[in-house]
Image: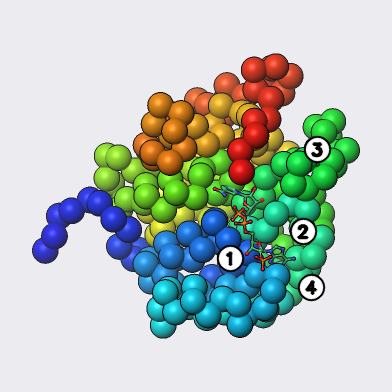
Amino acid sequence: MSTSTTGPAAPTSPASQTVGIIGAGNIGSTVARLAVDAGHRVVIANSRGPETLADLVADLGENARAATAAEAAQAGDLVVVTVPLKAYRELPAEQLAGKVVLDTNNYYPDRDGHIAELDDHSATTSELVARHLAGASVVKVFNNIFFIALAALSKPAGDPDRAALPIFGDDDDAKATATRFLDGLGYDAVDGGPLARSWRAENGRPVYVFPYAKDGDVATPVPADAATVRSLLEAAELDDPAQQPKTLS
Ligand SMILES: NC(=O)c1ccc[n+]([C@@H]2O[C@H](COP(=O)([O-])OP(=O)(O)OC[C@H]3O[C@@H](n4cnc5c(N)ncnc54)[C@H](OP(=O)(O)O)[C@@H]3O)[C@@H](O)[C@H]2O)c1
């Protein structure tokens, strides 16, 4: 048996689930690949319709299929929402009620337009998503890592180079579900607290993107472990001028 610690994590508990993914871009397609490699089934959607995802689902293999956003929401045992923040009100709230929803959103005013509650820090991006998805249990995750690093840093549990990702949520059971899902995908989870604290992992904060980037190059991934992630979350300061949002795609 191979003892290699590179490449995708082997499937672990829980047993295979159906993962709905709304958004099939950089992060959606990366999470889809990790989920399929972890033994899950994937139902993935974009804004233009399932027929436009034929190449992606062919590449993902027999455990992936394309659907509408409402169908992906309905089908998922858990659902990843990974659309530009400006589209969050289009997420299918009715079909997502009662589900664990993993939210990857970030706020880029140039792309999303200005949102007063985010500009004045009276809400976090995931609180806005959670308000729209009343009835769902929203967990913030995957927002602080560049998609190339997310694809590259997956490691089996126990690997000394395993990376960790912060998670935030208001429901402990949903966070436990997210933690198991991340484990299967090859990542440790660090519980950063409720959604109201998720600003600590937003654009410009110390844990955002660059801990997983060698010498500041986001295309050269390097793991950040759980202790590092924990201490970087604590280092976040709301009014620190050195921690203001940076322009990334
Ligand atoms: N890029 C990264 O490395 C990264 C890392 C962490 C977090 N994030 C955040 O995660 C989110 C997604 O980022 P991304 O880079 O993956 O974006 P992206 O490459 O631009 O992909 C966005 C996806 O969302 C779909 N979409 C847009 N509106 C939709 C709607 N109303 N219903 C269903 N699907 C819709 C798009 O479909 P169409 O193409 O059909 O319009 C596309 O598949 C953003 O908030 C981003 O800031 C990105």
Measure the C-alpha gap from mark 2 to mark 1.
Answer: 13 Å
Mark 2 residue CB less than 8 A from any atom of ligand 1: yes
Measure the C-alpha gap from mark 1 to mark 4.
Answer: 21 Å
Measure the C-alpha gap from mark 3 to mark 4.
Answer: 25 Å
Q: Please, what secondary structure does the residue beneath circle 1 have?
A: loop
Left or right: 211, with 128 as reference point: left
Residue 152: numbered disc: none
| Disc 3 and disc 1 in contact, CB within 8 angstroms | no
Q: Please, what secondary structure does the residue beneath circle 3 have?
A: helix
- Which quadrant holds the N terminus? bottom left
Q: For label 1, count other residues whose C-alpha is less than 10 Å away and answer few (under 14), some (14-19) or many (20+).
A: many
Left or right: 67, with 227 as reference point: right
| Disc 1 and disc 4 in contact, CB within 8 angstroms | no
Mark 1 residue CB less than 8 A from any atom of ligand 1: yes
Q: For label 2, count other residues whose C-alpha is less than 10 Å away and answer few (under 14), some (14-19) or many (20+).
A: few
Residue named by callout 4? 94
Task: Identify the residue at horizontal 82%, vertical 54% (top origin).
Answer: 131
Sequence-wise, the earlier of marks 2 and 3 is 2
Task: Identify the residue at horizontal 42%, vertical 74% (top origin).
Answer: 59
